[in-house]
Image (tube, rainbow, N blue to C red):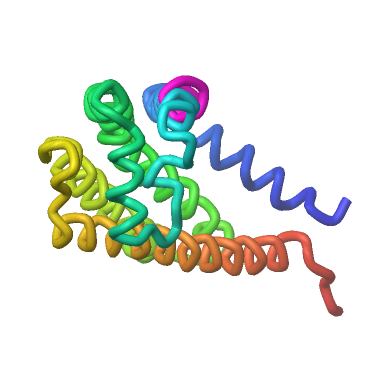
Amino acid sequence: MRCDRLWREGIAAWRRTTVAERLAVALLWGLTLTVLVAMWGTSIPRLEALAEAPILDLRPRPTVGEIAAYFEKLGGLGRGFYFWVQLRLDGVFPLLYGVTLTHLLWLVLRFAGMGPRVAVVVAVSVVAPTMVFDLLENHGIAALLLSPPGRIDPAVAAATAAYTQAKWLSAQLAGGFAGIALAIALRKHCGTRTP
């Protein structure tokens, strides 16, 4: 099989880790997936039903007008739910996915042949912008949720929209970089060998 070497090296790398390291990775992935399922299974559908529109976090390019209309349609109950439930989940989610995806990208970069220290720096540099913009976006949404109904600050709405756009752009760039790194790793371990 062409990718036998990749699987053998992956299993050997896993066996070199300690039980504590394995538990930490499993806990990290478990927490990340739990928060993701909690958002997608409960809070996001409820908010979308209340506002009859996708939540702001999922819109790649919301305008100030769309943001104001969204909060108006959400109403007091929806605003409270967004603040007390969705933002609590989404407050920890960027940190969890930031560490989880950094670890995953680090593994891909290592299999692509990058040294461990350089791989850490590159992985953090690729994943961190999305995480930071997501946290800034959440901060902006919190400020908008705390503003009086019907009195959205246009400057805060514009900044929040810019953070949302930057989050999605940096996520696309990070995904593209990860795809290229994965292609290099697969080519290295599974590609054809010339004599």
Residue 64, percent from left and from top: 28, 59
Indicate whether 57 appears above or below 41. below
Q: Is residue 161 left or right of residue 110?
A: left
Indicate whether 77 appears above or below 131. above
**5 or 85, which lies in front?**
85
| Residue lying at 69% horizontally and 67% vertically, measured from the top left | 188
Residue 63, percent from left and from top: 35, 61
| Residue lying at 41% horizontally and 40% vertically, measured from the top left | 55
Magenta-highlighted residues: 37-44
Main secondary structure along the magenta-highlighted residues? helix
Asked whether residue 42 is drawn in magenta, I would say yes
Residue 139 visible in the snapshot: yes
Q: Quadrant of residue 183?
A: bottom right
Residue 129, percent from left and from top: 31, 61
| Picture mark count | 0
What is the quadrant of the C terminus in the image?
Answer: bottom right
| Residue lying at 74% horizontally and 52% vertically, measured from the top left | 5
Residue 22 visible in the snapshot: no
Q: Quadrant of residue 100?
A: top left
Indicate whether 50 appears above or below 140. above
Asked whether residue 68 is drawn in magenta, I would say no
Q: Is residue 171 left or right of residue 69?
A: right
| Residue lying at 52% horizontally and 60% vertically, measured from the top left | 175
For the view shown, which residue lies furthest in the bottom direction? 195
Residue 81, percent from left and from top: 29, 23
